[in-house]
Image: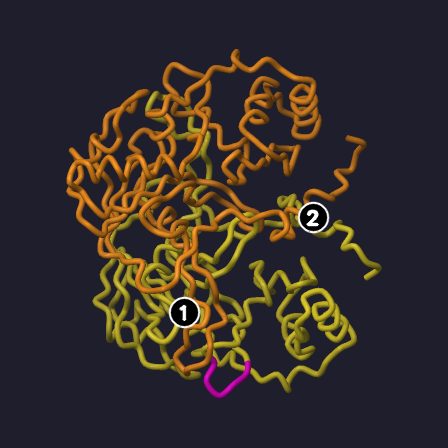
Chain colours: A orange, B yellow
Amino acid sequence: MKLEPVADLPEIRPGDDLAELIADRASLEAGDVLTVASTVVSKAEGRMVDLESYPVSGRAQELADRIESVAGERKDPRFAQAVLAESTELLIEAPFLLTETRFGHICVNAGIDRSNVPDHDLLLLPKKPAESAERIRTGLTERGLEDVSVIVTDTCGRPFRHGQRGVALGWAGMPASRDWRGEPDRDGRELGVTVQSVVDELASAANLVTGEGADGTPAVVVRDWAFGDLEGSDELFRAVEDDLVRQALREWDWGDDS
Amino acid sequence: MKLEPVADLPEIRPGDDLAELIADRASLEAGDVLTVASTVVSKAEGRMVDLESYPVSGRAQELADRIESVAGERKDPRFAQAVLAESTELLIEAPFLLTETRFGHICVNAGIDRSNVPDHDLLLLPKKPAESAERIRTGLTERGLEDVSVIVTDTCGRPFRHGQRGVALGWAGMPASRDWRGEPDRDGRELGVTVQSVVDELASAANLVTGEGADGTPAVVVRDWAFGDLEGSDELFRAVEDDLVRQALREWDWGDDS
């Protein structure tokens, strides 16, 4: 397996055609996986916004006050309002906002970025990253680059382990995971392991070569890797019924009367 | 960045010298990262055990009964006993056992494997994976292969997202994560992103080329990747005080009187 960053992508602006910009700079082949950071997808889709477009509700003011009292740092209530607008459920209220976004991804601050946003205050995640991935894939096909899978990526933290790692937000041209259940181990016994989240692993691998910051390259080509013959699944985000941690967070007594 | 599985490793037996077996089969160079699956590290360290070596405590019987009543499938109480023996804290009791292992990693069943264990019932995780990694690294150095970083890997599930992905259990020769805090973004603003868990990302990347099952290759060489000049940290496992999800799980009312 090889990973190569796509070099020399310009600063992305609303309306830019990512498929075209990438096709012009990367020698893509059938079977490749292309990862694209959600930041540039969001920019192309015009997801930059300013704080002043979020009139503060009582709930947002309450959250901002709560975070200030717990974490000891001022949170702009308009930012809390933006997070609420992008979310369907609030899992943790303080000292940070952990929410489920409208497309099912769970992350801090609904993934809203306050760095890397020229001329605006905030960069929202793509509205429907799976559709974004499909659009890029179609754009590549139209340019004769067929059979390239596309993953829209982000980085995010997690319980139990420090640090952030790359994750997939949307994907097209391949399933999200491959299912090893029923496969034999070396001794012919049935494997205990189960479902491998390949889109997340590809996003993590890509994140090792993109880098953050001024020299960051938002797109990576993964070559000489194949999904193989296993069954695939597109379920990546757990439902509450299937997630004891979410259930525990829902029922947790937060130690005050809110 | 390139990843290549180490071909033709034999079935690993207690006392085998992994550094030697790998050095004979891989053309390692200074700067490479070598990932080794915990299964083979455990086998070399003789971590195979049988269920009969776990006399069942009242607590283990209680857990097995509880899982049977919640999940509707029989759990061998000796297995529950083995999980308890390998753990310092039980985070979830049913329908599965989520525990913190003695070296700080949180996973289901304390990472005990019931497949891939010739002639025994169970394969425990390495006792101290960081020391295992250091031992392999030293063994490589003694064979003239200097400056190779080593990561002992496993796969594990996670809250919020379906599927398993590769994670690091122990590492040597490099820090666990790199710290982007304070780095400027493209517009010269300070980056919002923080700490990147590179050992987990490398483990995930490697897991894409190892595969599970009969054809699985437990060791992978990662080449043309560098940690770079950023600050590093070796903190990978979160302390309870730093983990709201663990706190919520501790205080969760499990819906019964246990």
Label 1 or label 2, whichever lies nearer to me, is: 2
Dot 1 amino acid type: Arg
Q: Secondary structure at mark 1?
A: helix
Front residue of A103/B147: it is A103
Give the x, y percent position of residue A209: 30, 44
Q: Secondary structure at mark 2?
A: helix
The chain letter under disc 2 is A
Label tally: 2
Q: CA distance from mark 1 to mark 2?
A: 40 Å
Give the x, y percent position of residue A7: 20, 35
Q: Which residue is mark 2?
A: A248
Dot 2 amino acid type: Ala
Is residue A135 rendered magenta in the image?
A: no
Q: Left or right of A154: which side holds A75?
A: right
Please give the name of the residue rendered at 58% of the width and 85% of the height, measured from the top-left corner: B50
Label 1 neighbour load within 10 Å: few <14, some 14-19, many 20+? some
Q: Left or right of A19: which side holds B83?
A: right
Front residue of B190/B82: it is B82
Q: Left or right of A249: which side holds A178?
A: left
Is residue B120 rendered magenta in the image?
A: yes
The chain letter under disc 1 is B
Q: Which residue is mark 1?
A: B135
Front residue of B184/A198: it is A198
Residue B135 falls in which quadrant of the image? bottom left
Label 2 neighbour load within 10 Å: few <14, some 14-19, many 20+? many
Front residue of B245/B127: it is B245
Dots 1 and 2 on the same chain: no
| Residue range (magenta) | B117-121
Give the x, y percent position of residue A51: 51, 15
Please give the name of the residue rendered at 41% of the width and 73% of the height, measured from the top-left corner: A183
Give the x, y percent position of residue A65: 69, 22
Please give the name of the residue rendered at 58% of the width and 48% of the height, measured from the top-left corner: A239
